[in-house]
Image (cartoon, rainbow, N blue to C red):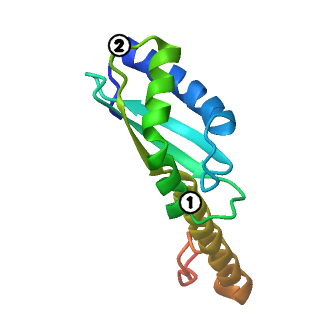
Amino acid sequence: MLKANARTSRIAAQMQRSLSTLLRRGVKDPRVGNVTVTAVDVANDLSYARIHVLPFAGEHPAEQVLTGLRSAAGFLRGEIARELKLRHAPRLEFHLDTAIEGAQHLTQLIESAVQADRSRGADGGGDPAEPDLPADEDA
């Protein structure tokens, strides 16, 4: 995370709301399409802002969407400066949000591990948490 103080947190939250609206209504580049702004991280000195985006149901690959966003960055920076009344708006850096893909991958790994445990249990292997011990004959 880049933001540390309350002011940059407020600016980041407002930038996320404004960018979401601007990307829907203001950007005419056909490469952009439906884009969701998932997070905005603003540097403490407001020199740059890292915008995490997630393209939805697009006709264009993610790299083309990023190219379209980067070409519209100047326009978006000016609009953000006007809306937020900032004298110096941060430079906008667009990045694909990979957190959802990572979460899906982890979920798949967990599901496959659970399935493997169940199949071992169904094969008569018993409970994997309890090792097979010989019966005590003296008891």
**Given the image, on which type of amino acid does mark 1 rest?**
Glu
Residue at the spot of label 1: 101
Horizontally, is 82 left or right of 87 in the view? right
Residue 73 place in picture, x, y as percent:
45, 40
> Residue 74: horizontal and vertical position, in percent?
42, 36
- Asked if 33 appears above or below 25 in the picture, the reply is below
Q: Quadrant of residue 93?
A: top left
- Residue assigned mark 2: 87
- Amino acid at dot 2: Arg
Given residues 111 and 72, the one toward you in this image is 72
Identify which residue, 68 or 6, lies in the foreground: 68
In the image, residue 19 lies at what x, y percent? 56, 31
Q: Is residue 49 visible?
A: yes
Q: Give the vertical position of 20 relative to 28 (above or below).
A: above
Image: 97 above or below 86? below
Q: Is residue 98 visible?
A: no
Q: Nearer the viewer, residue 20 or 121?
A: 20
- Please, what secondary structure does the residue beneath circle 1 have? helix
Q: Nearer the viewer, residue 109 or 56?
A: 56
**Quadrant in which the C terminus is drawn:** bottom right
* Residue drawn at the location 55% of the way across and 81% of the way down: 132
Q: Is residue 29 left or right of residue 87?
A: right
Extreme-bottom residue of the structure: 123
Spatial CA span between label 2 and label 1: 37 Å
Side (left or right) of 5 relative to 39: left
Q: Earlier in the sequence, mark 2 or mark 1?
A: 2
Choose top left, top right, bottom left or bottom right for residue 137: bottom right
How many residues crowd mark 2 within 10 Å: few (<14), some (14–19), many (20+)? Answer: few
